[in-house]
Amino acid sequence: MKLIFLGPPGAGKGTYATYAAKEYGIVHVSTGDLLRAEVKKETELGKEIGEIIQKGNLVPDRMITDLLKKRFEEPDCKKGYILDGFPRNIPQVHILKDDNIEFEHVINFTATKETIIKRLSGRRTCKKCGAIYHIINIPPKKEGVCDKCGGELYQREDQKEEVVKHRLEVYEEQTKPLIEHFRKEGSLIDIDADKKAEEVWEELKKLLDQLYK
Ligand code: AP5
């Protein structure tokens, strides 16, 4: 199973990629997570990346492809993967092809701007295992603590309303054109992610079970 998850920030790509990775025994490769891990290392590169992410802009293509190439060399990727957050512009689609990164389907998660802004402001992530929660929609059992590993939950730096709005503009300009690209290619499947999380997951699971039975 080799999939790409596409959609605006806050549509739920990370949430459903985590669920699907667990259900189907494949890996969730998130370019956002790879970049944030680099920021955590506090290297020169990490500092540069951190500043770009905080402003809600895309990092230069080469920076992300080097990290991605390294990740794909790890043996767990052989079992299958969900690529979440890449490609994000047309040049990255060419990189995908040039670097022979394989995929069978592109799942496009759709959600309205209003939903996205509400979701991102309530989003919390586990510092330890990366699990994603929402303080109202998908709350942890104990406030501030991850249900899965007991890790501390935190709010990402790029979740402030002005930054979220800018990320949405970047999405509209640079990432949205990919929908038509993959639709023409015949690999795109839409999922309405404006529904309740359990309903979206049910729909996705049904789709993947049909595609890979
Ligand atoms: P990245 O980490 O990829 O962020 P994003 O795509 O902007 O998306 P998010 O992670 O914010 O949202 P999501 O769709 O995964 O939704 P989530 O599951 O969290 O990228 C961050 C930055 O890194 C970029 O801005 C850029 O700077 C850089 N970057 C990354 N990739 C790059 C690339 N290829 N090239 C260049 N730069 C790159 O869900 C959101 C919230 O909603 C959660 O709280 C969740 O619990 C909740 N939720 C989910 N579904 C539902 C539902 N159905 N009902 C109610 N709540 C729900």
Image: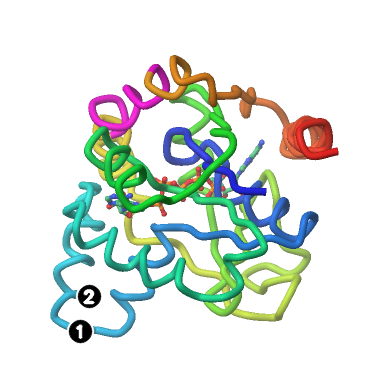
**Residue 176 part of the magenta segment:** yes
* Screen quadrant of the C terminus: top right
| Horizontal side, residue 79 vs residue 165: left or right | right
Disc ID at residue 156 = none
Residue 165, image quadrant:
top left
What secondary structure is found at the residue carrying circle 1?
Answer: loop
Q: Looking at the image, is 59 positioned above or below residue 129? A: above
90 or 31, which lies in front? 90
Please, what is the dominant secondary structure of the magenta stretch? helix
Badge 2: residue crowd in 10 Å (few <14, some 14–19, many ≥20): some
Q: Identify the residue shown where x is 21% and y is 52%.
A: 61
Give the amino acid type for the residue marked by disc 1 in the picture: Thr
**Residue 140 part of the magenta segment:** no
Task: Indicate yes or no: mark 1 CB to ligand 1 under 8 Å.
Answer: no
45 or 116, which lies in front? 45
Compute the Cα span from label 1 to label 2.
Answer: 5 Å
168 or 13, which lies in front? 13
Counting every numbered tag in the picture gives 2
Q: Are marks 1 and 2 in contact (CB under 8 Å)?
A: yes
Q: Identify the residue shown where x is 47% and y is 33%.
A: 7
Mark 2 — residue? 46
Mark 1 — residue? 43
Residue 113 at x, y = what percent?
Answer: 43, 25
What secondary structure is found at the residue carrying circle 2?
Answer: helix
Q: Looking at the image, is 49 positioned above or below residue 190? A: below
| Horizontal side, residue 38 vs residue 32: left or right | left
Q: Identify the residue shown where x is 23% and y is 26%.
A: 173
Residue 83 at x, y = what percent?
Answer: 50, 51
Q: Looking at the image, is 148 positioned above or below residue 99? A: below
Part of the protein shown in magenta: 171-180
